[in-house]
Image (tube, rainbow, N blue to C red):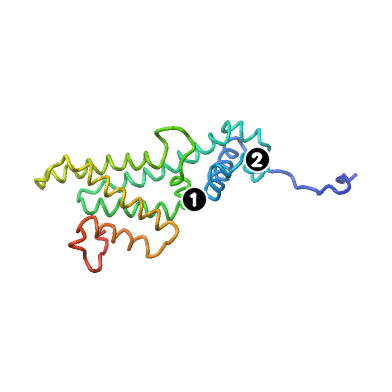
Amino acid sequence: MTSSSPAGTPERGPRVRMTGTQRRAQLIEIGRTLFAERGYEATSIEEVAQRAQVSKPVVYEHFGGKEGLYAVVVDREMSTLLSMITSSLTENRSRVRVERVALALLTYVEDHTDGFRILVRDSPVAAAEGTYSSLLNDAVGQVGHILAEDFSRRGIDPDNAPLYAQALVGMVSMTAQWWLDDRSPSKEAVAAHIVNLCWNGLTNLEADPQLGT
C-alpha cells in the first residue's frame, strides 16, 4: 500500500544525511556567505539553519552560537590570507618581496572575495587577535624585519624600518579594499603600480611600471 501525505502538505524527498564533519563544513560555508552578504549583525542563526535545512539547535551544537560560527569563519580566512602573505616573503630580493606581497593580497581578494569582505568589516568578537587589523600587524612585523636587514646593508638606519613597514602594508591594504569593488585594472597592473610608488617614490615614478616576476 502506497502512503500519501496529508492533504495540503507538500511531499519532500528523503533528506541526505551528513556526517558531523560534513554538516560543520556546510554550516561554515553558509555562514561565510551570509556574513559576506549582510555582515555580522544582520545575520541570524535562524537563517543559517534555514539554508542548511536543519534546526537551530544543530547550529548551536556545532558552534555554540553566532559568535562562535563567525570566529571559525574568520579564523579560516585569516589562515588562508596569512599563508599567502607569508609564502610571498621567501624571495631574497627586496623588490620581489614587495611585488609578491602586493600580488598575494590582491589574489586573495580575487579568489576569496567573500572572505575578504568579512575580514575588512569590524569584528564583533572582543579580542585583540583574530581580526584583519591583527593580521596586518603581523604583516607589518614581518615586512619590518625584512626592511631592517635591507636598510642595514645599505647604510640606512634600521630603526626606521617599522615606519616604512607600516606605510607599505597600509598602502597595499587600502588599495586592496578599493580594488575589491572596482576590479579594474588587473591585479597585476595594480600590484605593479603599488610597487612603482613603494620602490621609486613619487619623484622617480616609472611611466609604465611592470612586475619583474
As drawn, the residue found furthest toward the right would be 1
| Label 1 packing within 10 angstroms: few (<14), some (14-19), many (20+) | some
- Decide: is 211 above or below 65: below
Residue 114 bears which disc, if any?
Answer: 1
Residue at 40%, 58% (x, y): give it.
179
Residue at 66%, 36% (x, y): give it.
56
Residue 71 position in % (x across, y down): 49, 36
* Front in this rendered view, residue 58 or 2: 58
- Decide: is 47 above or below 127: below
Q: Secondary structure at mark 2?
A: helix
Quarter that holds the N terminus: top right
Could you tell whether 91 is left or right of 53 in the image?
A: left
As drawn, the residue found furthest toward the left would be 155
**Residue 62, image quadrant:** top right
Q: Are marks 1 and 2 in contact (CB under 8 Å)?
A: no
> Along the polypeptide, which appears first: circle 1 or circle 2?
2
Question: In the image, what residue type sits under mark 2?
Answer: Glu
Residue 166 position in % (x across, y down): 27, 45
**Residue 175, image quadrant:** bottom left
Could you tell whether 84 is left or right of 155 in the image?
A: right
Q: Secondary structure at mark 1?
A: helix
Residue at 44%, 45% (x, y): give it.
119
**Number of numbered discs overlaid on the protein picture:** 2
Residue 46 bears which disc, if any?
Answer: 2
* Front in this rendered view, residue 73 or 11: 73
**Residue 128, image quadrant:** top left
Residue at 18%, 62% (x, y): give it.
203
Residue 155 position in % (x across, y down): 9, 45
| Label 2 packing within 10 angstroms: few (<14), some (14-19), many (20+) | some
